[in-house]
């Protein structure tokens, strides 16, 4: 599925509450990713990265920032993770958002959180 899903547990929804939907779709269960448990970025990790400061404004979205700085909108979650803001609803106009760079180093840190 992608790097951020590599260590996720897959759950199976087969509760009686959903029998009608399961029957309608002619399936026995639904598979889903459980909520991820991500480590935060330590001060030691932050010290090894460059950051681009961005003041959150009207119309800003994590996916737009990821497209602009990483060339891939699907990497929006990297910016959210680094800033400990799970969704755009957790950001207010005027808040400082940091875009961590270089991406290769950030991805290494995400996959090796015990630095």
Image (cartoon, grey):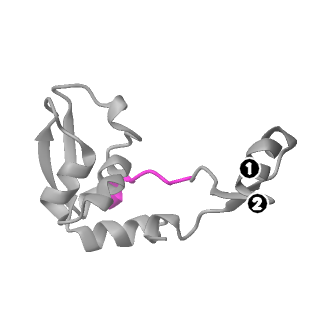
**Residue 112 higher or lower than 81, as above or below:** below
Magenta span has 41? yes
- Identity of the residue furthest to the right in this view: 16
* Left-right relation of 97 to 107: left
Q: Camera-side residue: 87 or 59? A: 59
Indicate whether 19 appears above or below 114.
above
- Label 2: state its secondary structure: loop
| Residue 93 picture location, percent across and down | 18, 25
Q: Is residue 67 magenta?
A: no
Quarter of the rendering containing residue 72: bottom left
How many other residues sit within 10 Å of disc 2, few (<14), some (14-19) or many (≥20)? few
The circle drawn on residue 27 is 2
Task: Give the residue at mark 1.
Answer: 24
The rendered magenta stretch, by its main secondary structure, is classed as loop
95, 11: nearer the viewer: 11
In magenta, the rendered stretch is 37-45
Which element carries disc 1, helix, strand or loop? Answer: helix
Give me the residue at 79% from left, 42% from top. Answer: 20
């Amino acid at each position: 599925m992608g790097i951020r899903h590599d260590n996720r547990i897959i759950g199976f929804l087969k509760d009686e509450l959903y029998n009608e939907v399961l029957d309608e779709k002619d399936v026995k269960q639904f598979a889903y990713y459980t909520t991820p448990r991500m480590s935060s970025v330590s001060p030691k990790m932050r010290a090894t990265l460059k950051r681009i400061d961005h003041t959150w404004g009207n119309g800003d979205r994590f996916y737009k920032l990821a497209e602009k700085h990483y060339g891939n909108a699907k990497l929006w979650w990297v910016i959210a993770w680094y800033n400990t803001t799970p969704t755009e609803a957790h950001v207010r106009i005027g808040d400082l958002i940091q875009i961590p760079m270089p991406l290769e180093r950030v991805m290494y840190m995400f996959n090796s959180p015990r630095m």
